[in-house]
Image (cartoon, rainbow, N blue to C red):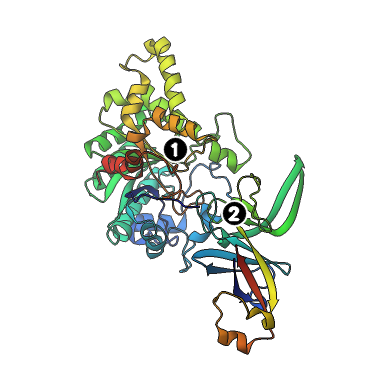
């Protein structure tokens, strides 16, 4: 079997770096919050994390020889990911739960520590990496403060939220955060996961992780609908969102349905001046992993066209997680060269200004 | 067709494996209860290093609440996405007709016969000489 691979640049829009140990953030916390961190620790809503068959949700071969957890060893990440696939840039999305803390001030302290740690221990030693501003997103003002504190640093390329929030993201409690993102000219990434205090599906609590993994688009759909219908893009016409690890095949039919609803119901949302799909096409980018695998190749081609994937889809590996996508194997081999190039690198390059 | 000596029998005890390079490809050679099997170390899904995966069994169910765990140690799960392959045939669990990993013929041969008619493997002639009473695992690349 001969496979010809044209060499294209690769930008990985979803990498998960991890803390080497529980006390790794200690140097980045103030005395007050270090004491809290050591003696009390975190408390978020529970129930959102279903047990995975894979420890740490990681590829079995991603446990570094150093004994550190997957994603915590920079030289091993360089070897296994950045060098192995010749990745030009990688976007770090650390998932340490700062945004979901019920103690909002502690969440803000954790976010500050995580952001400083990302720059000091990842972006400075490895110029291919870029960081995401972790924020305590359930408090718009605290989140805005953190965006203003770090958003001017060129090491950060987006603000990072988790998909299951306490309220739909169009709600006004989040708008201070959007003002700050616009002020700092940063897109907002929304990543798979989270516990907002509600059942993780629209119909209650499911039994299995496969239902969580396969059903995650529900949370993303709720966020897209809310952001559009609450008029966020009329108020923040330059605000951009990246939907990360939420799938992408579901977006075209959602646009069709919303447009159809809007034609009948637009009196209810007079702030919306255009078809919902027009806001969506203008303001949302999507990451590719895990690439959905339709049974027929022609379905995939249609999907890319319906999605405007040439402009909006961004390749991601999700390293070191178990559902990792390989840069040379995740997308069909006979994709048009310019489309491949845009999905593999240029769409992310433009959104994140790399 | 070329035969390659890849290990002594003692080197791969039951339940263990050895990853070898033969003719430019990476293979995993497995010992399942004394029988040897070899598979290409590349998952047909996305090219992950399949043969570094865990050896498990099949969990099957005919009805809710009824479970059977069978063929323990004979099912290889890819290190990346957990796709399951029957180590004896290379067939995938979810699509055995169409999705399979290349498997290779493996024999165990005595030291006395193993030195004739083989491609040079990782064992040198000197090794054969000093351990000629050993049994060797031989993989055939078709």
Is A94 situated above or below A212?
below
Residue A203 sits in quarter: top right
Separation (CA) of disc 2 from disc 1: 37 Å
Chain designation of label 1: A
Chain designation of label 2: B
Q: Nearer the viewer, residue B2 or A79?
A: B2
Expressed as whole percent of the image width and height from the top left, the position of residue B3 reads 60, 70
Is A350 situated above or below A61?
above
- Please report contact status of discs 2 and 1: CB closer than 8 Å, yes or no: no
Say which residue appears at 34% left-offset and 27% top-offset: A281
User: Which residue is labeled 2 in the image?
Assistant: B101
Mark 2 vs mark 1: give the one in front.
2
Number of other residues with Cα within 10 Å of mark 2, as a class: few under 14, some 14 to 19, many 20 or more: many
Say which residue appears at 32% left-offset and 45% top-offset: A345
Q: Nearer the viewer, residue A44 or A244?
A: A244
Asked whether residue A334 appears in the rendered view, the answer is yes
User: Which residue is labeled 1 in the image?
Assistant: A163
Left or right: A156 with respect to A201?
A: left
Is B87 situated above or below B34?
above
Q: Nearer the viewer, residue A98 or A283?
A: A283
Asked whether residue A142 appears in the rendered view, the answer is no
């Amino acid at each position: 079997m001969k496979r010809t691979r044209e060499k294209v640049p690769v930008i990985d829009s979803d990498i998960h770096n991890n803390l080497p140990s529980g006390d790794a953030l200690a140097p980045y916390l103030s005395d007050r919050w270090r004491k809290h961190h050591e003696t009390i620790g975190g408390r978020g809503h529970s129930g959102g994390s279903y047990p995975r068959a894979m420890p740490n949700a990681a590829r079995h071969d991603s446990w570094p020889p150093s004994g550190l957890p997957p994603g915590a060893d920079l030289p091993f990440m360089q070897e296994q990911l950045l060098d192995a696939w010749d990745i030009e840039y990688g976007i770090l999305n650390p998932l340490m739960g700062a945004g979901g803390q019920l103690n909002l001030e502690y969440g803000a302290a954790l976010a500050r520590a995580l952001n400083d740690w990302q720059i000091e221990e990842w972006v400075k030693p490895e110029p291919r990496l870029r960081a995401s501003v972790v924020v305590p997103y359930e408090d718009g003002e605290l989140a805005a403060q953190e965006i203003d504190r770090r958003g001017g640093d060129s090491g950060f390329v987006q603000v990072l939220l988790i998909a299951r929030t306490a309220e739909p993201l169009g709600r006004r409690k989040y708008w201070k955060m959007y003002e700050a993102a616009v002020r700092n000219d940063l897109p907002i990434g929304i990543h798979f996961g989270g516990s907002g205090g509600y059942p993780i599906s629209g119909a209650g609590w499911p039994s299995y992780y496969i239902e969580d993994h396969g059903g995650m688009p529900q949370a993303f759909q709720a966020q897209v609908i809310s952001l559009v219908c609450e008029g966020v893009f009329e108020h923040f016409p330059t605000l951009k969102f990246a939907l990360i690890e939420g799938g992408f095949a579901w977006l075209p039919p959602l646009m069709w349905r919303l447009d159809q609803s809007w034609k009948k119901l637009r009196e209810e949302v007079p702030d919306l001046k255009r078809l919902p799909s027009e806001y969506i096409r203008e303001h949302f980018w999507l990451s590719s992993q895990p690439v959905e695998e339709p049974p027929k190749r022609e379905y995939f081609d249609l999907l890319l066209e319906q999605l405007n994937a040439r402009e909006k889809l961004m390749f991601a590996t999700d390293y070191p997680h178990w559902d990792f996508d390989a840069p040379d194997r995740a997308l069909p081999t006979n994709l048009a060269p310019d489309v491949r190039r845009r999905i593999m690198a240029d769409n992310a390059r433009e959104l994140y200004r790399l | 067709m070329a035969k390659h000596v890849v290990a002594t029998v003692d080197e791969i005890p039951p339940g263990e494996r050895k990853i070898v390079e033969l003719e430019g490809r990476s293979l995993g050679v497995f010992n399942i209860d004394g029988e040897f099997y070899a598979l290409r170390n590349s998952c047909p899904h996305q090219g992950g290093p399949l043969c570094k995966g865990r050896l498990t069994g099949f969990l099957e169910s005919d009805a809710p609440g009824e479970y059977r765990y069978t063929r323990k140690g004979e099912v290889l799960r890819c290190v990346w996405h957990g796709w399951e392959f029957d180590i004896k045939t290379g067939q995938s669990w979810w699509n055995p007709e169409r999705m399979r990993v290349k498997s290779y013929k493996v024999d165990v041969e005595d030291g006395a016969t193993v030195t004739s008619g083989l491609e040079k493997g990782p064992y040198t002639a000197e090794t054969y000489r000093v351990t000629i009473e050993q049994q060797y695992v031989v993989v055939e690349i078709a």
